Image (spheres, helix red, strand yellow):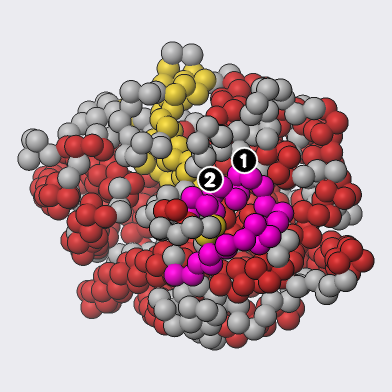
Amino acid sequence: MSDNPLLQPHTLPPFADIKPEHVAPAIQTIIDINLKQLAQWLPEQIIAPTWEGLVKPYEDLTQRLDVVLQVLDVVADGPLGEAYWASQERIQTYLAALAHNPTLFGAFQRLYQQDFGTSLNATERTALELIIRTLRLSGAGLEPGVQQRLTALELQLQVLYQRFSEHMAAANGLWTRLLTTPNELLGLSDNDQGQLRRAAEDRGHEGWLVTLDLPRYIAIMTYAQDRELREACYQAFYTQASDQGPTAGQYDNGPVLEQIRTLRLERANLLGYPDHAQLAQATRMFETCAEVQQWLTELAERIKPAALAEVEGLREYARIHDGIDLQPWDFEYYQERYRQAHYQVSEQAVSEYFPLETVLAGLGRLLERLFGLALQERQEAPRYHGDVRVYELLEGEVSLGHLYIDPYLRDGKAPGVWMKSMRDRHRWSDGRLQLPIARLSCDFNPPLGAAPTLLTLRNVRELLHEFGHAMHHLLTTVEHGSVAGIKGVAEDAVEFPSTLFEHWCRRGESLALLSGHYQTGATLPTSLLERIVAHGQYGAASEALDQIKFALGDLALHSAELTAGPAIERRLEQRFAYLPAPAYVRPVNQFGHVFATEDYAGGYYTYVWSAVMAADVFERFQAQGVLDKATATELRTLILAPGGTVSVAQMFAAFKGRGPDTGAYLAFLGIQN
């Protein structure tokens, strides 16, 4: 196997050398090596386990497999993806064998019990606690029959998560609408029209092709004057992969998500929890679902009047200017018109100051001002697609890791803007330090000819959000892979650093660092900057209420009741909607955060909770300077560096001197506390 690129040591993955035939042999080889090594050192650790003899080699086993799986996750499309998924049963069986090994679990428990705070430092003890918790939640210590059923459930769930994702992707491409006259395009920018024309040409049509790809959908809903077109797009978008709308019944995720909910409930019961929502709290900051639900409901009641006031302003504007009764498919369109009328801020005009290349360079300038770091592009680095840019994060001459940025929408690529770990920071038992790698994926429109990609303020905010995730992962100083960077962090706070970074695109000093007119290079004029900052909270209350509604829906979907998804949606609509949606809407069928992965299920409220903590923390920057290095140094040291080795509550208290408070968040939404 020496010629298998997945098994070779490398600073950056050799993507061009990886072939489908390398996948299964690499995974099997690593599993065989891991099991052989486990058999060598585990017997010696049964009576008197130690960190160096038990935990370190166990973390090496985990990292050895993760290094390969994280690379394969990057290229999980086409033949490589098929080979990867064909190995899932072997992977899950191996992971279950580790989790259900009573000797291994007993050794970890014995080390924890015999420590008494003397043999392990705080970081090591936290890492050990996390390992024990993870094993318990995988079924360690339970009866063999229960463990076997848990393994079977995990395999079934992995298949269903993949099916949910595949249905979303397939359904997204089902609906299109060909526009043939310029009048249908009124309101769209030249660039947006060019993107629709290119979509038509790619499919052999003349004219302009509207698709449900997010950048094109947002352009239609925000700028298209044709109301009937907006309504048709809205209906097609919010009925994807469901039993409703123009593609009803095709790739319907309804039965898939119901299977997922049922299996998750059974798994939770086997592990001793009443439902998945309560099981999920075992890895989060809150203790119980009831506590989360009460907090969310009370927060929603504080926010709803402000959201209703925002919508009433739009409703009045639409009635006065166009004589219409505002509907959901009018919302973004009239938000943009209202923004232009009341704040003199046009997203299309502002985007001219945010060409992608300038914004990416601006991220480096922001890092330098805040942390004294350099973000240098490495043109020679191997990459998995020609669009990808590779950067090295440097502190002086010292490398802290690498960042892959994949900026453009393309066929077959996972939609949305997101960040994933591609490698964890980890000190191997032989002393080698493995540096972290983060991957940031976007779905921005690619350039049209000589015209660059121009980002809206929304795009800039999305980019900064995911960049915050990447910095959380890359700036860790922890050398235990299981608790380094984003690993081991309470799952309802994982969006906290990323949401914090969004605030730097709402302040003039930092926003100027990211800007430069695509033709002249001029930064945003002071008058325009002031108007952008002034309108920064506009629409935030209705957006926040949406997130609370989704969070409460997630908890309800994972309660023991197993009420049908559409019924839960209607119940929440009646209570919290500021602009009620039609009965045909099926957002849960596209709820990939919750049903295409395990990460946010029962914990989608992280977006709300993290927004509260982020606004609270950013208060210090507002008071001491948006780009204040001393404050940024504390942020890096106290919150970004510790990874999962310090509880988020402790990190927060160290930075703010107290626990989180909703005051700053409500103030950001324009609500008096």
In the image, is residue 411 part of the stretch drawn in magenta? Answer: no
Q: Is residue 638 above or below residue 217?
A: above
x, y (%) of residue 455? 62, 40
Q: Residue at x 54, y 21 (%)?
A: 373
Could you tell me the amino acid type at mark 1?
A: Leu
Q: Position of residue 273 (x, y in %)?
A: 46, 75
Q: Which residues are magenta?
A: 174-199
Q: Which residue is mark 1?
A: 455
For disc 2, the neighbor class at 10 Å (few under 14, some 14 to 19, many from 20) is many
Q: Amino acid at mark 2?
A: Phe
Task: Give the secondary structure at mark 1.
Answer: loop
293 with respect to 554 (left or right): right
Considering the image in quadrants, where does the N terminus appear? top left
Q: Is residue 658 left or right of residue 563?
A: right
Measure how far apart labels 2 and 1 are at the Cα level.
8 Å
Q: Does residue 379 show up?
A: yes
185 drawn magenta: yes
* Quadrant in which the C terminus is drawn: bottom right
Badge 2 is on which residue? 444
Asked which quadrant contains residue 191, the reply is: top right
For residue 186, which numbered disc appears in the image?
A: none
Question: Is the Cβ of the residue at disc 2 closer than 8 Å to that at disc 1?
Answer: yes
The residue at the point 56 percent across, 69 percent down is 237
Residue shown at 37%/55% (left/top)?
412
Q: Secondary structure at mark 2?
A: strand
Q: Nearer the viewer, residue 124 or 37?
A: 37
The answer to which of marks 2 and 1 sits earlier in the sequence is: 2
* Horizontal arrangement in the rendering, residue 298 relative to residue 212 (left or right): right
